[in-house]
Image (cartoon, rainbow, N blue to C red):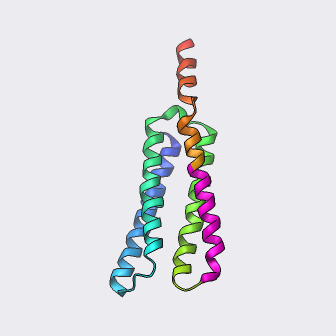
Amino acid sequence: MPRVAQLYFKTAFVFLVIGILMGLQMSISGNHNVIGAHAHANLLGWVTSALFGGYFALNPAKAGTRLALTQYGIYTGGVVLMTPALYFMLLGNPALEPLVAAGSLIAFAGVLLFGVIVFSRAESRALAGAAAE
């Protein structure tokens, strides 16, 4: 399996655990004011990372590029910045809103870069190079 796919699956697992822990904390305390952070950890951290990992596992030519690792770093960095900032902001720290916004924009840049990878012709170029050999 390509390295970037493995990184995405490992990252997804970490976010799954974090999302479950947030859910348990809300359930045990009866306080659900951090539900937005819980949702972001699960949807952006667990689900989207796993989907990105699956795409790269199925497209090894694209996964082997420097752009794929750059996209992983940008997207993951944004989610890692945004999720805890959102969690603590929702606990009553409104001063963290700029960090939430910055993390959101960074993660969005990672999503757009993923779109560039998906729509690129890197796979067909790699296949053409292999056929010429």
Instruction: Specify the quadrant that holds the C terminus.
Output: top right
Q: Is residue 55 on the magenta stretch? A: no
Q: Is residue 96 above or below residue 116?
A: below
Predominant SS along the magenta part:
helix
Q: Which span is picked out in magenta? A: 94-111
At a point 56% along the width and 64% down the height, the residue shown is 80
Q: Is residue 125 above or below residue 115?
A: above
Q: Is residue 124 above or below residue 110?
A: above
At a point 55% along the width and 86% down the height, the residue shown is 92
| Percent coordinates x, y for residue 70 in the rendering | 63, 47
| Percent coordinates x, y for residue 29 in the rendering | 37, 87
Q: Is residue 133 visible?
A: no
User: In the image, is 100 to the left or to the right of 59?
Assistant: right
| Percent coordinates x, y for residue 36 in the rendering | 46, 72
At a point 40% along the width and 81% down the height, the residue shown is 32
User: In the image, is 108 to the left or to the right of 20?
Assistant: right
Quadrant of the image occupied by residue 93 = bottom right
Q: Is residue 114 visible?
A: yes
Q: Is residue 49 above or below residue 1?
A: below
Q: Is residue 104 on the magenta stretch? A: yes
Quadrant of the image occupied by residue 85 = bottom right
User: In the image, is 28 to the left or to the right of 38?
Assistant: left
At a point 55% along the width and 18% down the height, the residue shown is 128
Comparing 9 with 119, the one in front is: 119
